[in-house]
Image (cartoon, grey):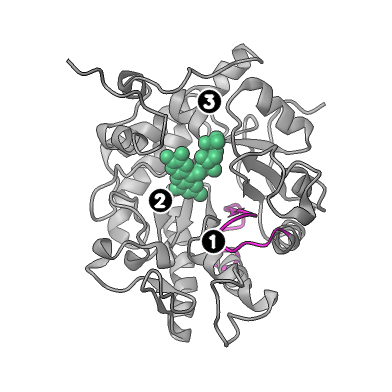
């Protein structure tokens, strides 16, 4: 039986030393221009020291106007290279597979972050005031994702993950509800997934043969159709072009919302798909040693740890020491998060996640 502590090889790039992947976690700690801050550096390097086999950055924007959060790490300009290089070197020194998550927020970009301009979307969106990308701009999005991947490779990262989940730009293209384009990037399933495939092809063509490439998808909400996402997942996994698929499920073992997919845990709708040489993992409430073990038994190749890794920088080491490891109970005192390497901005952000941080006692 494969265990959480067996190494995991990829077609490209170094093997993970174990099956623990740090989830991409927005922490808002970078500088306003997207350059890396010391707080973001320390938060991530501490996770690599804590034993993660793969350490991923937060979603990092590939275009200035694709910014989704204040203090977001940027990868859209060579001015980001020194910080990225420093980070890659420190992560690689810990023997972790180092990855940047590439992101464009699309219509979810807050206007105030982009000088009041309208956010960008496959097609105009009344609710957010987003405007439709022109055909040239769609091609520029692909070019900028590919350039960002190349920049990450130059910085020394082992690979990148394309953020195709959570209703951001790539997900907006995939969604038949959101994407109303009438050109070759809208309409049929092939057209709606074309941008993702063009980025994948571009990364494969422009980056080295050992540069790893992952894709993150989410099968529910944000206009996603679980049947279509299963189809895309199997096409991606068997294409030979990507090294791993990262399914963002939010709750790995829950049943799907879609009535026609009830009766089986969400994760099993993906573990049963043909996988080729691609590795398959999932994120969502894998917070205990027991749930991580169960996820492996369900047929995943690796587990993706989000909030468990915010709570415990050395989550993999904790599970290695105790297969029944349980994280500290929520809500946690601020001091716990500070001791786990979160800077003040990240601690404040975690206060917006209901029930995560304990209210300070009033005098
Ligand atoms: C504070 C926070 C920030 C997140 N930022 C990102 C992100 O930048 N990119 C992304 O794909 N998912 C992001 N997510 C989702 C996580 O990667 C993960 O899929 C989710 O938290 C479920 O895993 P968990 O139950 O182990 O926390 C974020 C989640 C949290 C809690």
Left/right placement of residue 51 relative to residue 361 reads right
Region rendered in magenta: 203-226
> Where does label 2 land, which residue?
155
Residue 51 is labelled as 3
Rendered view: 270 above or below 357: below
Q: Secondary structure at mark 2?
A: helix
Q: In x, y percent, where is residue 363? A: 17, 15
Q: Secondary structure at mark 1?
A: loop
Left/right placement of residue 67 relative to residue 140 reads left
Image quarter for residue 240?
Answer: bottom right
Left/right placement of residue 115 relative to residue 266 reads left
Q: Earlier in the sequence, mark 3 or mark 1?
A: 3
- Neighbourhood count class around disc 1 (C-alpha, 10 Å): few under 14, some 14–19, many 20 upward: many
> Where does label 1 land, which residue?
207
Q: Nearer the viewer, residue 278 or 93?
A: 278
- Neighbourhood count class around disc 2 (C-alpha, 10 Å): few under 14, some 14–19, many 20 upward: many
């Amino acid at each position: 039986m494969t265990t959480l502590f067996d190494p995991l090889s990829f077609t490209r790039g170094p093997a993970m030393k174990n099956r623990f992947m740090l989830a991409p976690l927005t922490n808002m700690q970078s500088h306003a221009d997207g350059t890396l801050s010391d707080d973001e550096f320390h938060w991530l390097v501490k996770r690599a020291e804590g034993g993660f086999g793969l350490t991923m950055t937060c979603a990092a924007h590939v275009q200035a106007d694709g910014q989704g959060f204040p203090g977001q790490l940027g990868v859209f300009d060579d001015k980001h290279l020194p910080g990225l290089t420093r980070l890659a070197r420190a992560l690689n020194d810990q023997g972790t597979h180092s990855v940047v998550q590439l992101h464009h927020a699309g219509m979810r970009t807050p206007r105030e972050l982009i000088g009041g301009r309208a956010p960008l979307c496959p097609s105009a969106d009344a609710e957010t005031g987003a405007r439709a990308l022109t055909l040239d701009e769609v091609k520029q999005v692909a070019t900028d994702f590919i350039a960002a991947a190349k920049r990450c490779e130059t910085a020394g990262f082992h690979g990148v993950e394309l953020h195709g989940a959570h209703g951001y730009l790539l997900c907006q293209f995939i969604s038949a509800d959101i994407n109303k384009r009438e050109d070759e990037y809208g309409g049929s399933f092939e057209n709606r997934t074309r941008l993702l495939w063009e980025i994948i092809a571009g990364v494969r063509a422009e980056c080295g043969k050992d540069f790893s490439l992952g894709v993150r998808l989410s099968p529910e909400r944000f206009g996603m159709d679980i049947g279509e996402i299963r189809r895309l997942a199997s096409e991606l996994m068997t294409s030979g072009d990507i090294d791993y698929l990262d399914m963002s499920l939010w709750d790995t073992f829950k049943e799907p919302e879609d009535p026609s997919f009830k009766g089986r845990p969400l994760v099993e709708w993906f573990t049963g798909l043909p996988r080729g040489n691609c590795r398959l993992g999932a994120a969502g409430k894998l917070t205990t040693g027991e749930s991580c073990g169960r996820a492996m038994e369900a047929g995943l190749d690796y587990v993706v740890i989000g909030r468990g890794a915010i709570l415990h920088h050395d989550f993999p080491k904790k599970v290695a020491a105790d297969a029944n490891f349980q994280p500290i109970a929520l809500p946690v005192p601020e001091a716990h998060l500070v001791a786990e390497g979160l800077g003040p901005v990240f601690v404040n952000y975690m206060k917006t996640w209901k029930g995560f941080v304990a209210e300070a006692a009033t005098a």
